[in-house]
Image: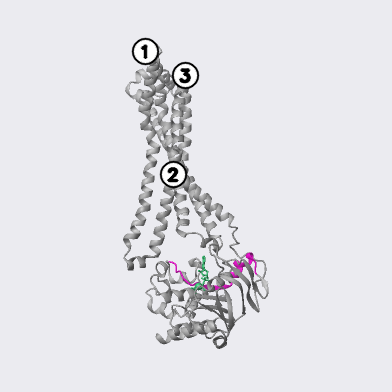
Amino acid sequence: MLPFLMLATDPGRFLHSPLGVQLVTYFPQLDTDALIITAGLFAVAMMMLANAASLLAEVMRARYAHGLGHWLQLRLVRHVLSQPYAYHLRRNSSVLTKTIVNDVDRFTHRIVFPLYDVFCCVSTSFFLLVALFVLEPWAAPLAIFALGSYYGLVFRVLRRRRQGVSQRMNAAMQGQFFVLGQLFSSLKMILTRHCEAFFAKRFGQSSSAYAGAATLIPIYSSGPKYLLEPVAFGALMVWIIAEISAGNDVMRVLPAAGMVAMACYRLLPSLQLLYGRLVVLTSMRHAVDEIVAELRDAAQAAPPPTSPTSERPLSWQRTLELVDVTFTYPNATTSALRQLNLQIRKGEFAGLVGATGSGKSTAADILLGLLEPDEGQVRLDGRPLGREDMPAWRERIGYVPQKVVLLDTTIEENIAFGLPREAIDPERVREAARVAQMLEFIEGHLPHGFQTPAGECGAFLSGGQQQRIGLARALYFEPELLVLDEATSALDNDTVARVIEAIRSNLDGVTILAIAHRLNTVRGCDTIFYMHGGVIECQGRFDELTARCPGFRRLAQLGEATQEAA
Ligand SMILES: Nc1ncnc2c1ncn2[C@@H]1O[C@H](COP(=O)(O)OP(=O)(O)OP(=O)(O)O)[C@@H](O)[C@H]1O
Ligand SMILES: [Mg+2]
């Protein structure tokens, strides 16, 4: 740029300068005007080149940082998904969401991005130092020593405070995700209890704590810059006073002090930038700690295989058993299951009943291999199932959990759960809905039939309809064993009878284990297991149990009383 301006403003003078002479020897055929145009074009080309290089560097940096973020997030999600069910029982989903989304985002934006600046600062400072050594050989080390000690000292003194900021920001962010998770899952309750202010206040406490902690970062990162002037001036004063008291001539030392001050002045911007970036970087330490802890925690949990890896044939002809199964939840003081024994024959309709908290869902989770028993085994035709068999075993089971959670997508995708759109068989979806007694409603009442959205957590459907979509979901995959954990609890008696009848007549040879409170669901069962306190207290057909099992009889009497009252 400068040669062009010099050439354009005073060509005569420039052409006689050493650079001008060289230019003329390179381009002897060009006259002055052509030289001016060439120099201008060259300057523009150089500028474009330099800017293109800067843009490329920015794009590369963004690509690397975001690519790393994407890789980390995917790794975390895969880790979380490959964990056993027990791992999720002790984790809070909001906190996991925060780590996957927010901590990784902070890591890329506040750590990876600044790292590039740190690298630039270090290289700029290095070149500046070399230049300073050339210009002011003795002042440069002094300047580096003075500024380096100052920033080093401040960095060290503020170490604990920065850690505190990092901790507080992390806790506050965790609090925000936690409250939001609670808020959206309890919206109906919040509105009916009219306690919006309570949740808004709790969220506000976390967000204000975050804002308060985040405000300290610029104080710690830029503060030293503003403190430097008085500190430097003070140091200069002390030096001058010391020289005067020693009887030296102040005028003699002033030029030297000036040189050091000038060297400091030149170094300051790069050092300040370096220091500022390091402060931000170290203040985000918790984001890294959380990600590392999550990955380590997940790795230590020794995940079971996620794909059907079992080499053994898992077909069974006679019995499915739980043998001497004992299980205690990690934070519980009493066992949920105690030496539980249960045998279901292939093709039978079995019922599992018992008071609330007696261990029915836990037994189902063990049967599905979601929980591993502390003692005892799950056996097929007498052969125990190992941990590696469980994914393949689960593929054969249709499971309707006690709380059906629908996805915020179409009814069709909810039934063909986990399949991409193009892999869904609409005829199978229709058939599953028909058996679950939902076909008439879906085709007759929903505006877009199977393509109607279900809403968040199935909000556009009634509780009983949600349950039947859950049932259709289990039936779509044509299971050998159907485990229904209170799957018909929200249905009326007529619908329950029709659902059970439809399943039995349409799914040839399917084995059903129906867990229920209401005994009319299990009245037609081949075998009913009555559970109490984590053990099977008695088993048999409905009439047999009414005759010889006092607990079951009480349950049956209560059920009849409730039905009469209704
Ligand atoms: N994640 C858990 N952590 C600790 N204890 C648990 C956990 N889940 C269940 N329990 C306890 O284990 C016992 C059995 O629970 P389970 O859910 O199997 O009962 P249930 O028979 O299915 O009850 P319900 O009929 O109410 O569904 C209960 O005492 C319960 O409090
Ligand atoms: Mg239960």
In the picture, the quarter occupied by the N terminus is: top left
Mark 3 or 1, closer to the camera: 1
Q: Amino acid at mark 2?
A: Gly
Circle 3 is placed at which residue position?
138
Can I make out residue 287 in this image? yes
Mark 1 or 2, closer to the camera: 2
State which region is magenta: 385-407
Circle 1 is placed at which residue position?
251
Q: From what the image shows, is residue 445 above or below residue 119?
A: below
Please report contact status of discs 3 and 1: CB closer than 8 Å, yes or no.
no
Query: Which label's residue is closer to the chain start, 3 or 2?
Result: 3
Q: CA distance from mark 1 to mark 2?
A: 48 Å
Q: CA distance from mark 3 to mark 2?
A: 40 Å
* Residue 510, position as x, y percentages in the image: 58, 79
Viewer-side residue, 556 vs 265: 556
* Residue 121, position as x, y percentages in the image: 45, 33
Ligand 1 closer than 8 Å to label 3 CB: no
Q: Amino acid at mark 1?
A: Met
Circle 2 is placed at which residue position?
164
Viewer-side residue, 493 vs 399: 493
Check the image and tell me how it is coloured.
one colour
Q: CA distance from mark 3 to mark 1?
A: 19 Å
- Residue at image position (46%, 22%) is 142
Q: Amino acid at mark 3?
A: Trp
- Residue at image position (47%, 54%) is 100
